[in-house]
Amino acid sequence: MDVFVAGFCFLTVLCIVLYVYTKTALTHAASPDFKKFQRVYLTVYLLAMGGDWLQGPHVYALYQSYDISSHSIQLLFVIGFGASMVVGTVVGSFADKYGRRANCILYGILYACACVTKHFGNFWVLLIGRLLGGTATSILYSAFESWLIYEHNQRGYDPELLSHTFSIGVLGNSLVAILAGLVAQWFADQYGFVAPFDISLTVLIVMCFVIIFTWSENYGDLSSSFSESFRSALKSIQTDKKVLCLGLIQSLFEGAMYMFVLEWTPALTPKDADLSGKTKGEHRGAIPHGIIFAAFMVAIMIGSSIFKILLRNWSPESFMRGVLVLSAVSLLLPVLFPASQVIVFSGFLIFECCVGIFWPSLGTMRGKYVPEKTRATIMNFFRIPLNMIVVLMLIQSLSMKVIFTCCCVFLFLASMFQQVLYQL
């Protein structure tokens, strides 16, 4: 446990130093009007992410408390990702035709309804909740960014300021994740596993009202029918190699990231640990999940600061090549040194730093290359391979070594597509 505490303390100090250092990273002075616009967007975005983070820690525990079997719980998760892949792609794509603002409000409504279903210990009701939640997730990762990019460009703000907004969003999201974990744990301890979902519901309702009173509406292509938008989005992916490369990079990286989320706990847990609190080894016991999670979030914040430093001299198209290779090497460590907790943990922290660089970099590149008319539709198409990867991994009984090997392969492939994008 000392290794994890020491790692967290070191990262926290480094994060603070980098944050102070990069506060002046912008080469263009931001106007008061832009700062107000940025605050309005980030308030909504962080409320949306908070509503999501509040639910994460206790989903599995809640299902178990309803005496749902492990097989049925796995089925619920598979259906959630499947819904995001199929239904979410369609509903999330409504943003271009019927409005990004309206789609973001729909996110809040769908996810709030999913929270309500958690009050019922019936498998079929919980199944509906997973369908609603999976659909909402697709909106979360497309409509909000689509709204931001359109408004940013429409108001004539400098493109460099968009990267700054993405970077702050990643940093703020990590802070919200830590806070949401603490809040969810306290309410779960006091009122039961369903309580964090009620808090999430409240946050989502507040988010909807903030959107209603502070956001204007924007669209993609109003003149096209929904089927025409789909065809146009597919054509852009097929004919524009930059858009195709971005989609492949996103799917491969996020696929590896989701598999990492599923496997980091067993990878760090000593083989001789007794999870009841007693261990066979002298110094090896159950890992401190909360501290490790907090360390991961701080590492992501460090990554967002490193992104701003890198952006001073290089474009995301250039430096992301090295970042993706580094992320692949970091997840190779559990394969090469599975018995070394220190080395594996260090590799995971490096990977999370890469995640912190990846998110604002990808948002910046999507802002450049993804067509405005079908932006949300294309972004939801990008998530189809991602969800297919996660579903296939969930229904297979693969060893941890095989899973991390797959992650490395995905990330090396992503770095190759990044090289192609750089050359283009």
Image (cartoon, grey):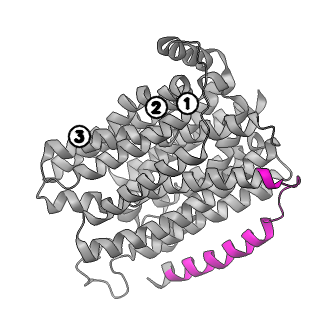
Question: Which amino acid, by three-letter code, is at mark 2?
Answer: Gly
Rendered view: 254 above or below 264: above
Q: Which residue is mark 3?
A: 128
Say whether marks 2 and 1 touch (CB < 8 Å): yes
Q: Which mark is residue 376?
A: 1
* Numbered range of the magenta stretch: 5-33
Secondary structure at badge 1 equals helix
Using the numbered discs, state the Cα–Cα distance from disc 3 to disc 2 in whole angstroms.
Answer: 18 Å
- Give the residue drawn at x 43%, y 42%: 107
Residue nearest the viewer, comparing 143 with 304: 143
Dominant secondary structure, magenta:
helix
Which of disc 3 and disc 1 is earlier in sequence?
Answer: 3
Q: Which residue is mark 2?
A: 92
Give the residue furthest to the bottom: 282
- Give the residue drawn at x 23%, y 47%: 74
Q: Position of residue 78 (x, y in %)?
A: 28, 41
